[in-house]
Image: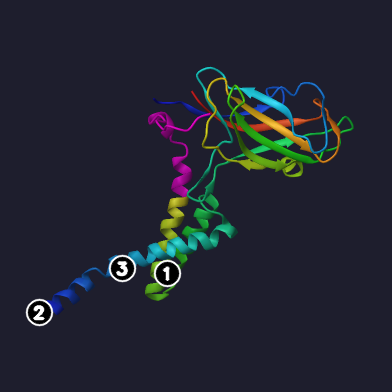
Amino acid sequence: MAYQKFQRYYNEDEFGLTSDVDVNADEWKRIGEIIVPAQTYLTFGAGSISNGVDYRRTCKIVLKDGSGNLISGKVRFAILNNAETRKIVVAEERTESLEQGVKLGEYPVKAQEDSKLILEFKPDANATISASNSTILVPTTAYQ
Amino acid sequence: MAKAENILKDIKINADFWELMGSGVLKYFEEILLQPYIGNGTYFSGAIKLFAGAMMKNAGLGKFGDMLSTAFIIDGTEDITRNLVKYVPVSVASPNNQQFETI
């Protein structure tokens, strides 16, 4: 089976962060979700380090409240099967790093059709994520 | 005795082989040591390595200098070639046939 491989970015709208979300301290909350389209394998990250050259793409997530302040906390990138009985946490990063941009290489396990790529967020303190003030740019690799 | 002479003759004939092997070892180490300073696999690092290699070749540093020079020239050429090859659509010519784990 031959696949056509390509890299693409998903933004906050595509992850479904279209309205404000309340998040509580020390509680993981799903803030974004992508259901893998038909005839596609999808995974977080794009590129790799090859022969000493860094081809990984940069992931940027800036979560801000209504006043435009950065909400501190942790973001998890996870892959789930459709029934959510299996879960792989691909990476966990702090929002301070993600604001600057974090290199996210292609993860070896791919989500198949109808499986999910999700973003979870655990803030340091209670807050409300403003959808209009926040930016999500997550590199992914698709095989079709 | 004649056998020993033949062996010595062989070593002499293969002198370039050992010199190139030395270059290979030096290339491995110079690539790692220089990576934090000039990077690796870029036009910039390639140009610096080629320039350094060319300078060393003419500096009269003896056999070690020659080996180091060869190491720099090969590594510099590799860096530049790697960037040129990026524009060849290899992935289109050879579709990805890998199998991967899925969830």
Are callouts 1 and 2 both on one chain? Answer: yes
Question: Could you tell which of marks 3 and 2 lies nearer the N-terminus?
Answer: 2
Q: Secondary structure at mark 1?
A: loop
Dot 3 falls on which chain? Answer: B
| Label 3 environment density (alpha carbons within 10 Å; few <14, some 14–19, many ≥20) | few
Q: Is residue B17 above or below residue A115?
A: below
Identify residue for label 1: B58
Identify the residue under disc 2: B2
N-terminal-most mark, 1 or 2 = 2
Task: Tell me how far mark 1 sits from mark 2, CA to CA.
Answer: 39 Å
Drawn side of residue B9 relative to residue A81, left or right:
left
Q: At which x and y percent is residue A75? A: 72, 37
Between residue A120 and residue A102, name the one nearer to us: A120
Extreme residue in the left direction: B2
Foreground residue, B23 or A15?
A15
Residue at image x 47%, y 64%?
B29
Q: Nearer the viewer, mark 1 or mark 3?
A: 3
Q: Residue at x 53, y 42 (%)?
A: A48
The mark nearer the N terminus, 1 or 3, is 3
Q: Secondary structure at mark 2?
A: helix
Please tell me how crowded label 1 is: few (under 14), some (14-19), or many (20+) other residues with Cα within 10 Å: few
Could you say which quadrant of the image residue A20 lies in?
A: top right
Residue A128 at x, y percent in the picture: 85, 30
For label 3, the residue is B18
Chain letter of the residue carrying label 1? B
Q: Secondary structure at mark 3?
A: helix
Which stretch appears magenta? B80-103
Task: Quadrant for residue A47, please give it.
Answer: top right
Q: In the image, what residue type sits under mark 3?
A: Trp
